[in-house]
Image (cartoon, helix red, strand yellow):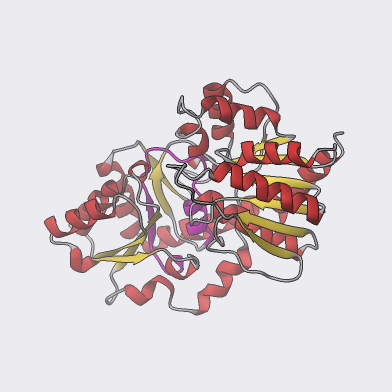
Amino acid sequence: MKIGISCYPTLGGSGVVATELAMALARLGDEVHVISYAMPSRLELVGPNLDFHEVVVPHYPLFDYPPYSLALATKMAEVARYQRLDLLHVHYAVPNAVSAVLARDIVGGNHLRVVTTLHGTDITLVGNDPNYLATTRYGIERSDAVTTVSDSLREDTIRQLGIERPIEVIPNFIEPERFLAARGGPGARRWARGDEALLVHVSNFRPVKRVLDVMRIFERIAQEVDCRLLLVGDGPDRALVEQRCRESNNCDRIQFTGNTAAIEEVLIGADLFLLPSETESFGLAALEAMSCEVPVIATAVGGLPEVVEDGVTGYLRPVGDIEAMASAALGLLRDPAKRRRFGKAARQQAVDRFSEAEIVELYRGLYRRALAGG
């Protein structure tokens, strides 16, 4: 198959999954063309089956806001026409789905298909905004096939946007060998001082991630256990976190690592992963931690209960319940055998339920059905 994949090039879940999918499809022999305004952070041009096409947005004095959606549609149509694509698989509804539908109309004929994968905030925040709701709904309804990354997000999409068309759930995935390969290195322990416990949080530091709650949980744990916190990522709330760090006199026990594409290099060897989000459509960061044998302490929201099994691979607690999450974390840190048991169970579930090979085949099956649908 000849497949165009469009995504945001950032380290957010939608861009990571789209990039990993593109590379996996190319390795299987499909011809893949990635289309975005910058090279995705995790994209590796693994061979002749994988190309990258940059969307260039012109800047004219007439435009206060450069029309990326139109430039994206134009590039999609160009690549589809000259590379003879079979389908466009777009990740994130706004504006990618609408741009893909427009590109299909520009190309004309009846051969190009549009598959849209919804990832979360494109529905729960952006797409649900009255300024975008009608176009978001239009892009979803006009797609040839639509998927969400969790049952929770599927239900949110139907309820919030009034979608009546079929939506298939295909979860996010991990490549198991990638995380095994990192075991030979120092991993998270490179930041440790002695035997202190290592807690990790990975996110885009947006308010929905509740990174200040991460700090509060850590502060509570640090009262009783010698520990260090690794904060991976960057974003709008970083300044607030740094301020909290200084006010609590914990800066010597908190490490900001910034963004990293090789997330396994920070997760391997960690003791616990903290994800106290307001909401998560899936929780890819939690899954990546699980694949590294790191138990997860998270909130019981959105798609997280579909990823983390409470009492088996980690613990799920109510949003904002700092004491409950800290107590759950302390229970594991004080019982190393139990923590290791949780970690091994986490790794096993990540491999059994979310392995790349199985999930990519679900997408390829969806592609084939879309192509056969008229």
Q: Residue furthest front?
A: 61
Which picture quadrant has residue 188?
bottom left
Q: Is residue 366 above or below residue 272?
A: above
Residue 72 in magenta stretch: no
Q: Position of residue 35 (x, y in %)?
A: 64, 54
> Percent from the top left, x then y, of residue 110?
85, 37
Q: Residue at x 50, y 57 (%)?
A: 290
Q: Tell me residue 311's x, y (percent).
A: 44, 45
Q: Which residues are magenta?
A: 267-291
Query: Percent from the top left, x then y, of residue 178?
Result: 59, 68
Residue drawn at the location 53% of the way across and 73% of the way down = 182
Q: Is residue 167 left or right of residue 291?
A: right
Residue drawn at (28%, 70%) of the image: 196
**Relative height, residue 44 to residue 80 (above, below):** below
* Position of 103 relative to 131 (above/below): below
Q: Quadrant of residue 339 in the image?
A: bottom left
Q: In the drawing, does residue 264 fall left or right of residue 162?
A: left
Q: Is residue 171 visible?
A: no
Residue at 55% over, 64% down: 42
In the image, is 364 to the left or to the right of 226?
A: right
Q: Quadrant of the C terminus?
A: top right
Count of numbered labels shown in the rendering: 0
**Residue 24 visible at all:** yes
